[in-house]
Image: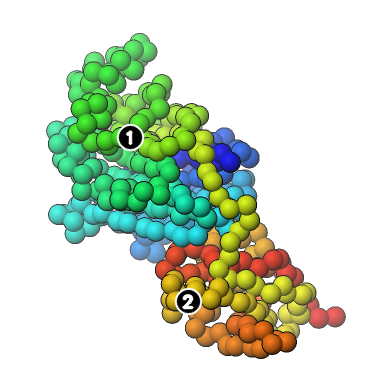
Amino acid sequence: MDWKITIFTYNLAMRPSYPEAVHNFLNGNVDEHTHLVAIGLQEVAHAETIGGAMITWAQSIAAWMNKNTRMVLLAKTFQATNQVLIFGRKQLIGQIKRIDYRFQRNTMRGLTGHKGSIGVRLQLTSPYSIVFVDSHFVHGPENNSKRIEQYHTNRICSFPEDKSVRAAFWFGDFNFRVEEDLETVIGKIKNGTHLELLDSRDQLKRAIIERDAFIGFHEQPITFEPTYRMTVGTTEPDGKRVPSWTDRVLYKGDGITEISYCNNKRAVASDHLPVIASFKVAATVAPKPQWEVVFEHLPTWYRSIPLVGRFQVNSQFYKENGSYRDWIGVFPATIDDCTTAIHWIYAATCFEQIIEGEKFLACEFADIPVGNYRLGYFASHLNCLVGLSKVFQIVDQP
């Protein structure tokens, strides 16, 4: 089976989220054939990660994706001002058996992660894994050697020791620059000859060719104009920095077919333009979900009665991957976000029940509003759902 995977990278320059900006960023770049979407954001405002912002880019992106693509948020994480969001089709929830994260910090000698990398590994219900790495490297045209050094220290985030990785995508604001004067580059953009700068003046291209960085990684042909630095609200270079292709998407692995690679000139909320890349990846997964936790089917339930759900657990699960931080959640039937439930309890608070000689664990929830729901078991060590019930309904008692 082939999966279509689309990667977004966007340096937000600390700009706030608003509906038009989110729509322009995403619209037209995810279709019904897309299986996975990975979004890397850099320079997200501090207020969004420490809780001061009323509306965040992550919330707005998730809401837009749920409404317009019906994709589910599978994973999310952040490091300082960098964030990663991964969405997938609902049927893929049961095809992912583990999600792992890695982080590398470079700012202030590793004290903070404003510059650094985030790695996310999706282990599938097959011998294969897919890895996504979002990076923000040190800025400045004079810091090429530091960026190369940062690549080597951040390489751990690509899970290089894992032989199961079928495909790895490394993206972000790499900050590699065009080594040319400002007037020459702007002139070439105006007369349409800017692409010739990639072979002769682009620091990242040179680093890959000379095997100084991103060894084994490839890049789709660039056919778009530089993505930095723009006058905010326009697609015009600001005339203060040499225009460069700082925002890139690289890939490595077997069975990967290039589909498209472009910038997005509709998204002008930042001094960077977003970059989007799509690929087709040969993915082998089990034909059906392989749940570690199996929920008993729930009948229609009256709201006035506390909800009791029962489930059984694979005999080896708690021994190998169980945690006192595992939790059971009540999710909307649409499961917009696998990481956040409407209501939840720790699995350790569940109690045993014997039904017709079979042992079950039972969870109880009170005062769930009328609606359609599912129960899900989230494994803390695996960072994903390992059990999901069928849809059930809660109604008012006649």
Residue of label 1: 217
Residue 366's image quarter? bottom right
* Crowd tier of the residue under label 2, counting other residues whose Cα lies within 10 Å: few below 14, some 14–19, many 20 or above: few
Query: Is the residue 9 above or below the residue 362 in the image?
Result: above
- Label 2 – label 1 distance at C-alpha: 38 Å
Q: Is residue 95 visible?
A: yes
Upstream in sequence: badge 2 or badge 1: 1
Left or right relative to 299: residue 50: left
Residue of label 2: 318
Residue 147 image position (x, y, % from top left):
20, 39
Type of amino acid at the residue the image marks with label 1: Phe
Left or right relative to 200: residue 349: right
Q: Is residue 143 visible?
A: no
Residue 225 image position (x, y, % from top left):
37, 23
Query: Is the residue 311 above or below the residue 239 in the image?
Result: below
* Crowd tier of the residue under label 1, counting other residues whose Cα lies within 10 Å: few below 14, some 14–19, many 20 or above: some
